[in-house]
Image: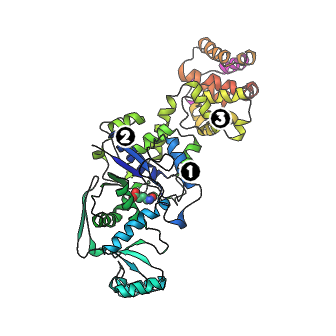
Amino acid sequence: MKNVRVRYAPSPTGNLHIGNTRTALFNFLFAKHYQGSFIVRIEDTDIARNQEGAIESQFDNLKWLGFEIDESIYNPKNYGPYRQLERLDIYQKYVDKLLAEKHAYRCFCTEEELLTEKELQLAQKIIATKYSQKCKHLTLEQVNEKITQKVPFSVRFAVPNSKTYNFDDIVRGNVSFESSDIGDWVIQKNNKIPTYNFAAAIDDFEMKISHVIRGEEHISNTPKQLMVFEAIKQQPPIFAHLTLIVNENNKKLSKRDGNLDQFISQYKEKGFLPEAMFNFISLLGWSPKGEEEIFDKKTLISIFDESRLSKSPSFFDIKKLVWINFQYMKKMDDTTYVNFVKQFLDKDLSEKPNEFILEIISLFKKELEFGSQINELAQIILNPANTKNQETQDHLKDLEYSKDFISSLHKELSNCEWSPVDIKAVIVKLGKDYSLKGKNLFMTTRIFTTNSFQGPELAKVIYLLGKDFVLNNIKKELK
Ligand code: GLU
């Protein structure tokens, strides 16, 4: 495919959400797969919803995830400006052209009039209310008079009568809409700011966008955008509307759902890795051939295939995200791992001596799934169990050991140099002395020294729990 130019077009209304990231990501993979350009365009025409700092946060998070952006407000090329509020004169030119060619007309109706009209239709049981076209029928004199009187006006698109708008969607195949279902919609508000559908279509044309890849909530906007392309006599881009991302109850992810982290920044703060997030999100609504699921960015670019975009909703499976992150954590070398995890320590851990912190972090190298999980795992050292719970006692019943073994354990540990190596040597020696192996040696030792039946490397755990705690524990049993 040649001259691929795609855009991710966020409205700066908040933080970078999983859904938007997925849209950005498929645009990016598609662009890079075909050696095309990935553009970020800021759609800020809904002024009331714009949020301070949202643009910067979008870019910061995209950058963290590893997106390379070819054109944007920060690296403009020939198709700028890349922020819609800076393109008002461009839209004005098209509004004037459409007005002159009767594809659009001025509407002087006030908000109250429009509301009354709508209520009247609703009273007549018309659910899909439409603008009455009252102003479409004003004479030139009437229009000029209102303009002279400075009556505020918006501009409406004159939707053609009984026309079918078709497009061949990459994900859904043929999609069609009847123009009779669409009222004459506003393309420019009375403050001279264009509406989303108009601005997006004009920008997609002016920026030479070849493909529009976006969420399925925009499918009903497509006929309006096609009308604009038709009116300006230009070819529309090719569309791909991505299916929904759903939660475990099969409901569309909603930003209001407080139970699920949905913003990239939340995962970043929890200690998820950008490569893992990128990998996970690439599988939300797209699947490669075969069973493998761990792919770096370069591989994803090379294997991305738009014909494998999913036709059914994709499940936001947090367990899978954790699993993918774990696969990436395991690949880290020791130094990178320690430096990464160190950033996520809670106060009770971060205040400990540096050496102790490092020991704890390394202790969990084989099981840590994401950075901040260290705080939870470290609890077995920071707040160890003082008694054996039922499950631990049940395990103990199945083990073979002697009272002599326990008292030797106490004796040998009291006499040993308190280091993981020496502690390990004690356990090995006692195993030989008492002919104990496997669970009978290690689980028994673990239960009597730590009160729990499972955990990471035993000698290190004993070492970190400290001599007093461990010896006290064993002593309780000997009484
Ligand atoms: N600004 C729109 C949004 O944030 C983008 C729609 C589009 O891609 O056309 O949903």
Point 44% across, 85% down: residue = 146
Residue at coordinates 47% horizontally, 82% vertically from top-left? 111
Query: Ligand 1 within 8 A of label 3's CB?
Result: no
In the rendered image, which residue does mark 1 sit on?
56
- Quadrant of the rendered structure where residue 235 is? bottom left
Earlier sequence position, callout 3 versus callout 1: 1
* Residue 398 is one of the magenta-drawn residues: yes
Q: Amino acid at mark 3?
A: Ile
> In this view of the protein, which residue sits in the foreground, 353 or 185?
185
Q: Dominant secondary structure of the magenta stretch?
A: helix
Task: Specify start and end residues of the magenta stretch as a single range.
Answer: 397-411
Residue 88, x across and y down, in percent: 46, 64
**Residue that appears at 65% across and 32% down:** 451
Q: Nearer the viewer, mark 3 or mark 2?
A: 2
Q: Marks 2 and 1, Cα distance to the nearest angstrom? A: 23 Å
Q: Give me the C-alpha separation between circle 3 and circle 1.
A: 40 Å
Determine which residue is flagged by label 3. 380
Q: Are marks 3 and 1 in contact (CB under 8 Å)?
A: no
Image coordinates of residue 305 in percent, x first then y, are: 30, 42
Q: Which mark is residue 32?
A: 2
Q: Is residue 172 left or right of residue 394?
A: left
**Image position of 141 with respect to 332: above or below:** below
